[in-house]
């Protein structure tokens, strides 16, 4: 809205409409959001229910829960690390931490795999004979 003053008279209000009224906008927004909701209900065949994978531990060592912070970025979100025989075997976000309040970002969720992945290069690679 734009307020204009004509001499000493009371200011008048000019509406800056873009060819659509507020009522038309609300109707179109409602129809659009209803269509999106209906489409999401119809598209359930494309999604599967997630299933947790069961991991077995070869040895029966007790699991220690250690509170630590995520080192993926500078925020410092809290997490609980599950440690067996000095090996980091699992992690959960800290629900009582003030920064992340129980959430994980993508970097934080994959933090453990930076050091414990089978794809990780563990020794320096050397080029010998062109290979």
Image (cartoon, grey):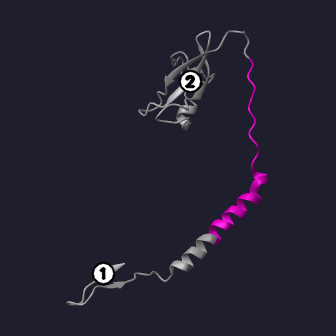
Query: How far from the left and from the top, in percent, is residue 26?
Result: 56, 74
Q: Please check the rendered image and state whether residue 50 is part of the magenta-colored stretch, yes or no.
A: yes
Circle 2 residue: 80
In this rendering, would 41 be left or right of 20?
Answer: right
Q: What is the magenta range?
A: 31-56
Could you say where residue 53 lies in the image, as x and y percent from the top left? 74, 29
**Residue 125 coordinates in the image, percent (x, y):** 52, 18
| Residue that appears at 54% across and 27% down | 79
Q: Residue at (60%, 76%) from the top-left corner?
A: 27
Identify the element where label 1 is drawn: strand
Q: Is residue 97 above or below residue 58?
A: below
Q: Quadrant of residue 39?
A: bottom right
Label 2 crowding class (10 Å Cα cut-off): few <14, some 14-19, many 20+? some
State the residue in front, 112 or 81: 81
Q: Pick whichever of labels 1 and 2 is earlier in the sequence.
A: 1
Where residue 23 sits, quadrant-wise, is bottom right
The residue that mark 1 highlights is: 3
What kind of secondary structure does the magenta stretch mostly adopt? Answer: helix
For marks 1 and 2, give the CA distance.
Answer: 57 Å
């Amino acid at each position: 809205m734009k307020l204009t003053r004509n001499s000493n008279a009371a200011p008048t209000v000019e509406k800056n409409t873009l060819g659509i009224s507020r009522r038309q906008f609300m109707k179109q927004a409602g129809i659009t959001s209803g269509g999106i909701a209906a489409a999401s209900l119809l598209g359930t065949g494309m999604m599967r229910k997630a299933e947790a994978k069961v991991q077995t531990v070869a040895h029966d060592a007790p699991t220690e829960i250690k509170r630590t912070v995520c080192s993926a970025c500078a925020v410092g979100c809290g997490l609980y690390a599950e440690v067996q025989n000095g090996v980091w075997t699992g992690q959960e976000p800290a629900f009582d931490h003030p920064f992340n309040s129980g959430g994980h970002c993508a970097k934080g969720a994959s933090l453990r795999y930076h050091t414990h992945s089978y794809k990780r290069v563990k020794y320096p690679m050397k080029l010998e004979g062109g290979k």
